[in-house]
Image: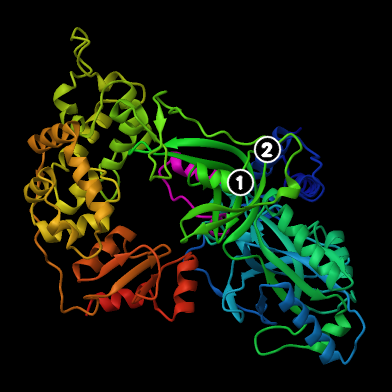
């Protein structure tokens, strides 16, 4: 191959044409046919040569150049694109009865009793796009936006190698519409990479795809592995097809990926079978779907049916149950919490449930496992309880493997081997090892440094586990003596009894210094945070705040608990006898009192001063937060609401006054609407708290 510096302009133009065609051919083979044409090394070699030639001859860069898949930085925000034909949304239905009603309405409109063919298409949970082609060349792409006007994502969409940049035998003007998505595997890989680099963790593949596609720098989009499915059209100068099915054939011939699970249905029975089939295979698909779209197959009938104000009469979206999904239990394992409770957890085939990827579900306790006869290998229906904790609803017994065996709940702790006993009046089995059990000790320290407790940066779960097993931390009080016990990395002749953090793998002088600074910055703590950090059974952050408000100081609270004086405690609205018993029992343990006294020698617990503004619009109101806020963290928003006299709850009920909805909100917002609870967006919340 000729040296690039020796190429003439004519030779460079010829080679750039060859490289563009060769790499496009490779892209088609890889992305359309799952049959790689070039090895990764060969592909990368051609890519680098193409870039080098273009660097020497910038005037020769082709419209279909592989380098244009990477794109150039957008100098400002995205420009707007007005859709020649609106990108309308579909109406939603949630049951087969509603689907039947929809089909009847189509037949009534067409004045026919004959069966009508429908295309059944998986509803991809991604981001809609429109790609415009003129004379067979890709010229522009846009998001759906508000249906009328979208954002120009031409350079970004160009980075997705599944998108043909040139198509043959196409109408002079052709808009192809579809969905950009991120596969589950690529989503997990991206989150794992981001976690290692301390970057944003995405809640689900759709958010990851949207965030990746809307980067102002297309080079970042190019680094993310995005995919597309094409399924409809917008403006077209000449329609060559007469049915949805025929259109898919054209798409495939032009090189666009179409969903392999698209199915032609001749009647309601076919539609129901298609829906059930997609429900069953949903968890095994490499991408997320959130329902099925049914479209009248005949274009002539579509044109007769026309549109309502915002939706077509000839198509409907049959959504999966919003908070339920079908998946498989790969394993059942036992977790040991900081109170010694043995909790069974199902490891699931990852599945999107209500907008969140779920790979684990609680099985609650051994009675629940027996009652539902849950076994490893079972296919199950899961749902998210209260928008947070996934749980198994039902086992699909017909799908149970022939070699299935009943799950035997352990009677010994899987962590320390101590007896696990179950009191007569409790459903929970508990480890008798106490804080001698590593799981309980480790979990108590992890809880102690968590966000709503001491919030010590640098003491994540993995580091706490390592420090515990190396003897550096045995209880929460040890955190505040690490610095004085650390000998220092330069003293090579020091006693082995001390700590040598600087010598640990992955640690250095700066990281050790950062850890000590983080610990020392938390030597003063508010009373509610301290009470919560102790990890007393049933005492969450809201209960800790109630205790702080009513007792004022930790000494006052501890005195009453040690002396079993619970009258004041039980009189607090929201604290019952069972909760009070747990608090008293915690302070009867000599081990706990010893650790508390050690802590109080190292830290200062501030007395509680009620600074809540009881004249604010939130005073006395019950507030629930859902979704991701942009202006502040969820913890900051909760603290602000509480400072204004509000009670922050974790779930929506008829007693809720406001639900504050951020991005990617789950079922809480839906439930609020059902109950008639007022839902505020973040801007409205910010306005409310500024009054």
Give the residue pinned by disc 2: 44
Q: Is residue 613 left or right of residue 341?
A: left
Residue 195: in magenta span: yes
Give coordinates of residue 643: x percent, y percent: 19, 67
Q: Is residue 564 above or below residue 639?
A: above
Q: Is residue 207 above or below residue 376?
A: below
Q: What residue span does the magenta drawing correspond to?
A: 188-208
The residue that appears at 21% across and 41% down in the rendered structure is 586
Cα gap from disc 2 to disc 1, whole angstroms: 20 Å
Q: Quadrant of residue 185?
A: top right
Residue 476: in magenta span: no
Query: In front: 386, or 102?
Result: 386
Which one is closest to the eye, mark 2 or mark 1? 1
Give the residue pinned by disc 1: 186
Residue found at the far top of this picture:
493
Give coordinates of residue 608: x percent, y percent: 10, 57
First in sequence: mark 2 vs mark 1: 2
């Amino acid at each position: 191959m000729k040296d690039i510096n020796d190429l003439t302009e004519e030779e460079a133009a010829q080679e750039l044409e060859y490289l563009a065609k060769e790499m496009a051919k490779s892209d088609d083979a890889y992305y359309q046919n799952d049959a790689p044409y070039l090895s990764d090394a060969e592909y990368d070699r051609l890519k680098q040569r193409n870039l080098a030639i273009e660097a020497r001859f910038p005037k020769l860069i082709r419209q279909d150049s592989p380098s244009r898949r990477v794109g150039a930085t957008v100098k400002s925000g995205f420009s707007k694109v007005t859709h020649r034909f609106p990108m309308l949304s579909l109406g939603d239905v949630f049951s087969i009865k509603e689907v039947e009603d929809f089909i009847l309405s189509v037949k009534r409109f067409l004045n026919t009793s004959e069966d009508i063919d429908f295309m059944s298409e998986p509803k991809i949970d991604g981001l809609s796009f429109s790609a415009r082609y003129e004379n067979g060349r890709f010229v522009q792409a846009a998001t759906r936006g508000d249906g009328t006007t979208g954002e120009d994502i031409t350079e970004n969409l160009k980075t997705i190698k599944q998108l043909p940049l040139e198509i043959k035998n196409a109408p002079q003007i052709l808009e192809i519409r579809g969905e950009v998505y991120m596969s589950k595997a690529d989503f997990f890989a991206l989150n794992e990479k981001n976690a290692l680099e301390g970057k944003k963790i995405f809640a689900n593949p759709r958010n990851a795809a949207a965030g990746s596609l809307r980067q102002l720098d297309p080079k970042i989009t190019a680094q993310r592995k995005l995919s597309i499915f094409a399924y409809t059209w917008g403006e077209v100068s000449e329609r060559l097809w007469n049915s949805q099915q025929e259109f898919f054939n054209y798409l495939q011939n032009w090189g666009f990926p179409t969903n392999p699970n698209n199915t032609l249905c001749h009647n309601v029975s076919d539609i129901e079978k298609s829906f059930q089939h997609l429900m069953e295979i949903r968890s095994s698909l490499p991408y997320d779907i959130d329902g099925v779209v049914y479209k009248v197959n005949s274009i002539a009938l579509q044109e007769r049916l026309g549109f309502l104000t915002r939706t077509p009469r000839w198509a409907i979206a049959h959504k999966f149950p919003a908070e339920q999904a079908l998946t498989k239990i790969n394993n059942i394992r036992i977790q040991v919490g900081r109170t010694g409770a043995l909790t069974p957890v199902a490891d699931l085939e990852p599945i999107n449930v209500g907008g969140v990827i779920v790979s684990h579900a609680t099985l609650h306790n051994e009675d629940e496992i027996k009652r539902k006869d849950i076994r490893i290998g079972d296919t199950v229906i899961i749902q998210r309880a209260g928008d947070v904790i996934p749980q198994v609803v039902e086992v699909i017994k017909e799908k149970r493997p022939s070699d299935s065996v009943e799950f035997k709940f352990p009677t010994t702790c899987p962590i320390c081997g101590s007896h696990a006993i179950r009191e007569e009046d409790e459903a929970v089995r508990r480890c008798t090892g106490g804080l001698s059990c590593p799981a309980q000790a480790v979990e108590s320290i992890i809880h102690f440094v968590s966000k709503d407790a001491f919030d010590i940066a640098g003491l994540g779960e993995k580091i706490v586990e390592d420090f515990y097993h190396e003897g550096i931390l045995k209880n929460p009080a040890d955190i505040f003596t690490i610095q004085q016990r650390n000998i220092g990395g330069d003293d090579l002749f020091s006693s082995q009894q001390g700590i040598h953090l600087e010598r640990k793998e992955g640690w250095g002088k700066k990281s050790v210094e950062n850890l000590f600074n983080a610990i020392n910055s938390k030597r003063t703590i508010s009373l509610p945070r301290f009470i919560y950090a102790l990890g007393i059974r049933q005492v969450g952050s809201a209960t800790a705040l109630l205790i702080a408000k009513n007792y004022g100081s930790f000494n006052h609270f501890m005195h009453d608990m040690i002396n079993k004086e619970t009258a004041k405690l039980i009189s607090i609205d929201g604290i019952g006898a069972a909760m009070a018993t747990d608090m008293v029992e915690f302070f009867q343990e000599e081990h706990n009192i010893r650790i508390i006294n050690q802590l109080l020698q190292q830290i200062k617990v501030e007395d509680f001063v009620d600074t809540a503004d009881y004249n604010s619009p939130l005073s006395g109101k019950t507030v629930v937060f859902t979704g991701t806020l942009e202006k502040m963290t969820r913890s900051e928003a909760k603290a602000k609401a509480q400072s204004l006299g509000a009670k922050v709850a974790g779930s929506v009920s008829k007693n809720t006054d406001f639900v504050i909805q951020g991005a990617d909100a789950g079922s809480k917002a839906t439930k609020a609407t059902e109950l008639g609870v007022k839902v505020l967006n973040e801007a409205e919340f910010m306005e409310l708290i500024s009054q």
